[in-house]
Image (cartoon, helix red, strand yellow):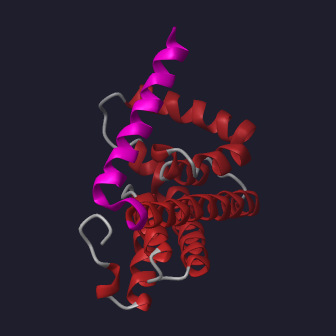
Amino acid sequence: MVFGFDPASISPLVAYGALFGLIAIESGGIPGESALAIAGIAAADGHLSIVWVIVVAAAAAIAGDNAGFFAGRRYGRRIWLWGRVWRKRRERWLDEANGFIDEWGTTAVVVGRWVTVARYTVAWLAGINRMSWRRFFVANAVGGISWATTIGLAAYWLGTVAKTGFEAFGAIGLVLLLVALAGHRLWHRRRRRR
């Protein structure tokens, strides 16, 4: 069971399809990182292949961001500047974003994959501001592949550790371990603030 859901209850093909769909539509603002984490945990449990989870997630991230890029290029400026309320402010912000994309576009696309809000806005901004598609595609592929690999493997590893911990210590031992880890992290935060 992963977050109250049993991955074994659906076929791997349907699971990979759902993973692709959730991550691909992320450019529209629906979070896909949770789907990747769940799929990584399901792979740790042996229901999916971690290699296919990463391949599907990377392909979906690249496809979704490319769709966002082309939608931004075609409709983004019109949508962003629609209406009269704060139009001058929105125009100024778009000009600033254009300068940012010109100077930092490649980095923004790669790093944006790792930042929740930027994950589904940078592709649109790159399209709105007429970033070269080849430049965008390469940066987007690097960001999408590294993001899918890192998050997928982290969830896979944590799923394996959680499963092993649960088998070794039982539910109570696992809860105590999680409480101890949370307490340790809180202690480190307070110590750094001082």
| In the foreground, 173 or 104 | 173
Main SS, magenta residues: helix
| In the foreground, 92 or 61 | 61
Residue sitting at the far left: 4
Compared to residue 143, the image places residue 54 above or below, namely below
Task: Left or right? Give the position of 182 relative to 74.
Answer: left
Q: Position of residue 66 (x, y in %)?
A: 58, 66
- Position of the N terminus by quadrant: bottom left
Q: Which residues are magenta?
A: 167-194
Image point 76% across, 57% down: which residue?
A: 135
Compared to residue 180, the image places residue 174 above or below, namely below
Image point 39% across, 57% down: which residue?
A: 31
177 magenta-colored = yes
13 magenta-colored = no
Image point 60% across, 68% down: which residue?
A: 62
| In the foreground, 70 or 41 | 41
Compared to residue 144, the image places residue 39 above or below, namely below
Q: Quadrant of residue 3?
A: bottom left
Q: Position of residue 139 (x, y in %)?
A: 72, 57
